[in-house]
Image (cartoon, helix red, strand yellow):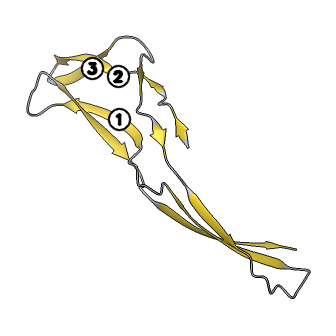
Amino acid sequence: MYSTGNAVTFPTGKYQMDGYSLFQYNKRNADRMPVYHRMDLSATYEPSDNTNKRFRGSWSFGIYNVYGNANTYTISFEDNPINPGAIRTMQTSLFRWIPNITYNFKF
């Protein structure tokens, strides 16, 4: 799966007011989040000895994001403690790998 990043609005500057940092924004949706990509793998096992023709079952095993790419979920902004005049960005990523097991049955 591959998709381009969503349109977002990032701050272009900041100013101080009553001891608080306020971010200044320029154009709406002028920036993009990083691209999203992952590869999923799955396999299904169907026993060949299903003697009961009325009910059939199978097991599926898989993993999402096989190569463990840390896709960006959100980006937040805060004051940079090293350089107070700059803005520091913080990327949040969720799960790297998500395994799954499923039992399917037909009747």
State the image coordinates of residue 92 (x, y, percent, origin top left): 35, 44
Residue 101 vs residue 50: left or right? left
Q: Compare marks 3 and 1 and give the one earlier in the sequence.
A: 3
- Mark number, residue 75: 1
- In the rendered image, the vertical position of residue 7 relative to residue 73, given as above or below: above
* Residue 44 image position (x, y, % from top left): 68, 69
Please, what is the three-letter code of the amino acid marked with disc 2?
Answer: Phe
- Of tags 3 and 2, which is closer to the observer? 2
User: x, y percentage for residue 33?
Assistant: 41, 30
Q: Which mark is residue 10?
A: 2
Towards the viewer: 61 or 24: 61
Real-space CA distance between mark 3 and mark 2, rounded to the nearest whole angstrom: 9 Å
Instruction: From the viewer's perspective, tell me whether residue 47 is left or right of residue 7.
Output: right
Q: Residue at x 19, y 25 (%)?
A: 20
Q: Distance between the Cα atoms at labels 1 and 2?
A: 9 Å
Q: Secondary structure at mark 2?
A: loop
Quarter of the image holding residue 81? Answer: top left
> Which residue is the site of mark 3?
23
